[in-house]
Image (cartoon, rainbow, N blue to C red):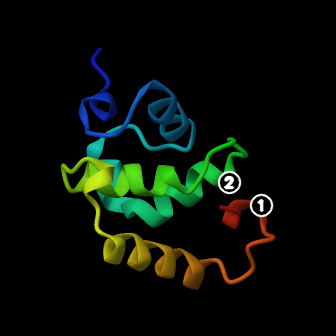
Amino acid sequence: MEDELLQMKNLGKTSAQWLHAAGIHNAADLRRLGPILAYRAVKARDFRTSKALLYYIAGALNDLDWRDLTQADKARLDGELSRLCPNPKNADCQT
């Protein structure tokens, strides 16, 4: 069976494995959650990832290379993450 997540831009083997472990198995799951909640689901599993994964997911959902996200796009994502995670000391909110 082919992994649908691996067919999306920016998502490699490791990020797909993390997403699967977080209960995200295909593009529909990823779209339903969106980049912020998907990123938080991975972080909640204690995987050693960085905020770059947030940008990879956002790019994948828009069929863009993550490097093509604008600074405004990244700032918006960072702001949304901060609003959902006002206390970054929480394990699932650490970036």
Question: Which badge, 1 or 2, comes first in the chain's sequence?
Answer: 2
Judging depth in this view, the residue of 50 and 47 nearest the camera is: 50
Judging depth in this view, the residue of 93 and 1 nearest the camera is: 93
Q: Residue at x 73, y 46 (%)?
A: 46
Residue type, label 1: Ala
Q: Is residue 7 above or below residue 32?
A: above
In 3D space, how far apart are the residues under numbered discs 1 and 2 (Cα atoms)?
Answer: 7 Å
Residue assigned mark 2:
44
Residue type, label 2: Ala
Q: Residue at x 44, y 33 (%)?
A: 16
Residue assigned mark 1:
91
Of all residues, the one furthest to the right in this rendering is: 89
Local secondary structure at mark 1: helix
Is 79 left, or right, of 8 in this rendering?
A: right
CB-based contact (under 8 Å), mark 1 and mark 2: yes
Position in image of residue 91 (x %, y %): 77, 61
Q: Is residue 86 above or below residue 32?
A: below
On residue 73, which mark appears? none
Quadrant for the N terminus in the image: top left
Is 92 left, or right, of 56 in this rendering?
A: right
